[in-house]
Amino acid sequence: MKKAFLSVLIVTAALLLFSCTLSVTDDTGSRTEAAPETSETIPATQTETGTEARTEKETATEEPSDTETETADSEEATLPGPPEIDYDVNAHLGSNRVLIDAGHGFADPGCTSDFLNGVYESQITYEMASLLANKLAEKGYEPVMLRGEDSFPSISEIRAAVAELGMFSRDDVLNENNIFDAYERTLWGNVIHRRNPVALMISLHINALPSADYVRGTELYYTVDNGCAEPSARLTAFIETKLKTAFPDTRLRTEGCVWNDSFIVTKWTEMPSVLVEMAYATNEDDAKLIFDDGWRDKYVTALAEAIDSYIGTRG
């Protein structure tokens, strides 16, 4: 009898334990399952390729929620971590040359929206880059355009230069496809830098977030763990200050990206570099500003002043 009673108790306890395992709920009473650990997602931008995911941390009234994390200016960081640094991290010091990257171009037009009336990002970035080059020339600097309006180096030219200079490269991702993509343009920027050092590289882009067309403003990005992280952070800070002064009412977000999640145009550069997402093509108010000559002049003036301040105070 005692044995039978003990057996009943054991079976009952087992059933209760199994029941508890099945009925785990969250605070709302909904059934939940254990989620795998994930790393924090930092923006990717279709800076040179296609669409980039971005996690916004601000409130939903001003920024997209974590479920609205798409942007059309994106660049998935598919390359591995940095190679062992084999270049002079101080080569930028003393240089009076500024490398300007007009994002996208040719077979890669970048983003657009209904508000841009058929105009694509690549055209806007080239026009803004040209205005910035003129402003910098007026201040006595030597601007260097990374790409022309309708020309860019061939893959064979890039490969030859890399071999000549003994540079590290991911040859398997270099494709002769009429697209001067993010890695190719960054590699070519490093070629330019090794042949005749530049003070910095600034990459200009237009952003897009179709799922949250209320989001507008400027976003600045640099990489926190490449060879020129510290001067890149200072350069970004100068740009942030000048833009806030010029446009006190606009949203301006600044972020230092960790290596594995950051943008190729800042993480693979051998000189101080910053990515500037100037405005949102998917926001009607921003789109109007993009075509406003007064806004353009004011914007590139702020960038030129920031670059001038940075170069004037570098070590």
Image (spheres, grey):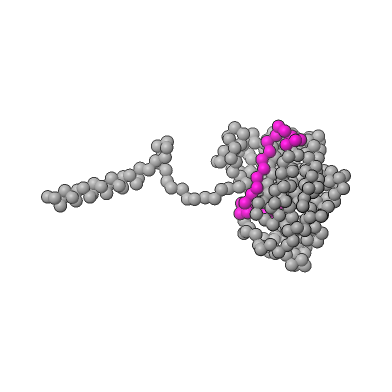
Q: Is residue 26 above or below residue 173?
A: above
The stretch drawn in magenta includes residue 250: yes
Q: Nearer the viewer, residue 50 or 55?
A: 55
Residue 74 within the magenta-colored segment of the rendering:
no
**Residue at the image position 82 percent from the left and 43 percent from the top:** 131
- For this view, does 197 lie left or right of residue 229? right
Q: Which residues are magenta?
A: 244-268
Q: Horizontally, is 130 left or right of 70 in the view?
A: right
x and y percentages locating residue 1 in the rendered image: 12, 50
Q: Nearer the viewer, residue 23 or 120?
A: 23
Question: From this viewpoint, is residue 278 visible?
Answer: no
Q: Is residue 89 above or below residue 19?
A: below
- Quarter occupied by residue 116: top right
The residue drawn where x is 25% and y is 47% is 13
Residue found at the far left of this picture? 1
Horizontal and vertical percent position of residue 114: 69, 37
Name the residue at 62% across, 51% down.
258
Q: Is 276 left, or right, of 4 in this rendering?
A: right
